[in-house]
Image (cartoon, rainbow, N blue to C red):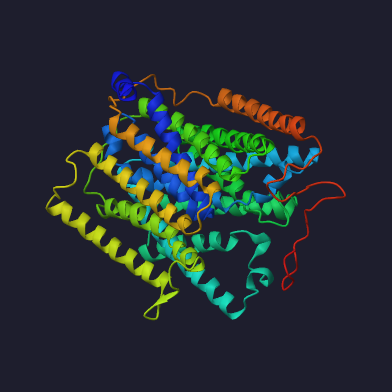
Amino acid sequence: MKFLKALDSNPHSALLPILLTALSLSIGWGIRGNFGHEIGALTPGALAAAAVVLTSGRPDWHRRIAYFAFFGALGWSFGGSMSYGQVLGYTHSGHSPSVLYGFASLFVIGFLWGAMGTAGTAMPAVLDRRALTEFFAPISAVFIAWWGQDRFVEWLVAVNPAYRQESPLYWYDTDWLGVLAAIVAVLVLAVVRRRFDEASRFILYLAVGWWAGFVLLVLVFGLRMTPPRGDNWAGCTGMTAAMILYFVRRGQGELVRAAIVGGFFGGFGFAFANALKLIGVATGWATNWHSVMEQTYGFINGLGVAVVMLGLARRSARLEDDSSVRRWTDVYAVVFVLAGITYLNLRRNPVTWVNAESVPAAIVGVSAEAWFALAYLLIAVMLIALLIRHRRHPLSFLPADWHGRGQLFYLVFLWWMVVGNFERSVVAFAPTRMITEGVIFLHAVICTMLLLTYRSSPATAAADDSTRPLGRTVMAGAAVMVLCIVGCWGMTRVIYGDAVAGNIKRQIRFGSESTATRERPAAGQPHP
């Protein structure tokens, strides 16, 4: 009761919106640990974006909550392509240069991830509806191209099971083929439509930037962060630089600020969360320390999103939405988040159930995966039909105001993923899973309470500092970067010295004991 009274007596406190956003991204990041890569990173991006919008005090943002979740999810997904398992191994190695290198690499990866994710989250707060909804057609073209690429790769693997190791298409184990497919998709769409819009231009900026980063850093200078693992970090570096350049050329200073501030939060978060994990490992307590690191990293990223977005809520002008502009995108965004993101992640559950012998591999001759996909198809069709009907004849169960609808949207998505994630692990549950599924459940309960009891007030406009130079921010961030990297390295050396931390495979980047392999295998030769 005291907790509820505290909430009620401090309706204007900035602490609760920050806490809700940070916990939301932490939950999503903990869930991502079970699903991984770009698909897994969609969840924390959508959750954090929806949380910060609902506590922003901006009714005009509430109307766009599905757009915020959509673009926030996509922004955070890009970083999921970067490999970091070997980097973590460097920090556990007990080899001083490798430990320092590992923490520096984690800061770089975290910066790139945070920059792209926070910028994506901020875009619906800056762009008008026409510019924002213009993205849906080219993004859909890219999705279709990626679907076709996946089917092509599946066919190649079926023909030759060793394809992943032997094919030259796995060039430095990067996503170059997907980036090329995105470029082709956007250009084909432009030819079909006989016009080239600004959204397509932005996507090309990102894709060409990816190629520039990969070619310059890897092919020209021979820089490889985690050989022989993939070098998508180089492509993401070029993509982040191209994104910031595009924002600068378009005069979108708030998005530049969002990327830089979010990037420094992300860099600090990844390195510092791993240092906290190493402290935990030193206690000798056997638990899922990797999940502790992931959820802590997600929490710090969420702090960055909250700082950027709540500041933007006070500075930015009111958004005027003409609901007649591309009305179909409203349905698209809702269905993508509620049915699309959940399916893309949870579709892996049936394989886990079958392997645990909890579900038969096939029922009446149809695989468990196919039954799962069919069920999701029915849910998607139902959702689309209800949303379309709601436009003509409002459904009684939906709240009348956009804030209430946003709360329903957030809670449905949150608990859908929390329950779906638990369903994946429950068939082989162990005590160590309590630090993952147990903490995720607890945080979801807290987020539900915070969301439904927090009374936000309209955001009051502060002095517009969107034109303020970013020099001080960059300098402060650079100082934090140096202190964080050196501090995490020094702390690890004090605790472990030359001893191996354990809990993960040891990796050494430099010297005669190096486990890194710099050479790229020739076409047709197996990957080391």
Residue 405, given in percent of the width and then of the height, sits at 24, 42
Q: Is residue 217 left or right of residue 241?
A: right
Query: Hey, which quadrant is residue 496 in on the image?
Result: top right
Q: Is residue 339 above or below residue 408?
A: below
Residue 268, given in percent of the width and then of the height, sits at 60, 33
Q: Nearer the viewer, residue 181 or 441?
A: 441
Residue lying furthest right: 512
Residue 198, given in percent of the width and then of the height, sits at 41, 49
Residue lying furthest left: 393
Quadrant (top left, top right, bottom left, bottom right) of the N terminus: top left
Q: Is residue 393 left or right of residue 177?
A: left
Q: Nearer the viewer, residue 311 or 2?
A: 2
Q: Is residue 223 above or below residue 448?
A: below
Residue at the (35%, 55%) spot, across then down: 336
Residue 152, given in percent of the width and then of the height, sits at 52, 73
Q: Is residue 381 left or right of residue 503?
A: left
Residue 123 visible somewhere in the drawing: no
**Circle count:** 0
Q: Is residue 293 above or below residue 364?
A: above
Q: Nearer the viewer, residue 77 or 503?
A: 503
Q: Nearer the viewer, residue 319 or 60?
A: 60
Residue 379 visible somewhere in the drawing: yes
Residue at the (73%, 33%) spot, across then down: 492
Quadrant (top left, top right, bottom left, bottom right) of the C terminus: bottom right
